[in-house]
Image: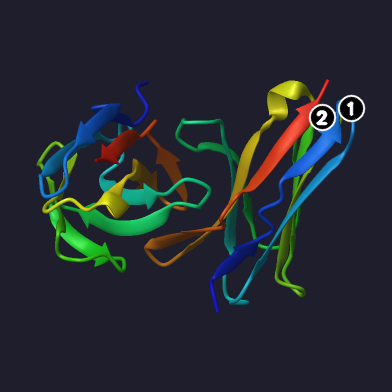
Amino acid sequence: DAGVTQSPTHLIKTRGQQVTLRCSPKSGHDTVSWYQQALGQGPQFIFQYYEEEERQRGNFPDRFSGHQFPNYSSELNVNALLLGDSALYLCASSSGNTIYFGEGSWLTVV
Amino acid sequence: QKEVEQDPGPLSVPEGAIVSLNCTYSNSAFQYFMWYRQYSRKGPELLMYTYSSGNKEDGRFTAQVDKSSKYISLFIRDSQPSDSATYLCAIHTGNQFYFGTGTSLTVIP
């Protein structure tokens, strides 16, 4: 049973560019959430998708947007990248009261 | 006030020691509590999941919830160098999960 898979694992972007990160949830999970984890910090909730709709959103600007597809996979898009967007971006899928994370995508903005 | 607070450490112990990791939370209505282990540059891995008060044991790991004090703990017995990682506590409420900042643990051989 494949767990949560994310791509790419590492990427480097320049300030002002746009990035798209991808996620496939754990089998049987229909809810996908995205988190940003800066070095030395806990994961910070960006938003959650369920049934292809954004169900909940954390305190992140509109530069952060997402999408969920009919097969429950999801994308996170970040526009107009800032140096402060450099972080580990974690996708998580949930079923009931537990949440499972992928290995994350390391984004470095230079 | 943050939903969950965690002592960031770092914590350094000799191999074989008992480790205690702790978090406090703000809302007495919270009922679902989790501990995650995160190795360097990897995603968090679910270790333990508990519901309401009491203890839950899994091998060398014990998760404890004290709802009267709004305190959750993870105990690691006979700690091993492979336990060296960052440990995150988490709470589930509604559709959201809240995470502590993580405690960095190093077990010295």
Mark closest to the chain's N terminus, 2 or 1: 1
**In the shown orientation, is residue A16 left or right of residue B8?**
left
Residue A31 placed where, x, y %?
28, 48
Front residue (pair A5, B109): B109
Could you tell me the amino acid type at mark 2?
Answer: Ser
Could you tell me the amino acid type at mark 1?
Answer: Gly
Render colour scheme: rainbow
Name which quarter of the figure residue B100 lies in: bottom right
**In the shown orientation, is residue A75 left or right of residue A47?**
left
Q: Say which element carries label 1.
A: loop
Residue A56, compared with residue A93, is above or below; it is below
Do the residues bearing badges 2 and 1 touch, measured as CB atoms within 8 Å? yes
Residue B70 placed where, x, y %?
70, 71
Residue on which disc 1 sits: B16
Q: Can residue A67 be seen in this snapshot? A: yes
Residue B21, compared with residue A110, is above or below; it is below
Residue A5 placed where, x, y %?
30, 28
What residue is shown at x 42% (from left), y 51% (from top)? A96
**Mark 2, chain letter?**
B
Within-10-Å neighbours for mark 1: few <14, some 14–19, many 20+: some
Residue on which disc 2 sits: B79
Front residue (pair B49, A66): A66
Within-10-Å neighbours for mark 2: few <14, some 14–19, many 20+: many
Residue A105 placed where, x, y %?
31, 34
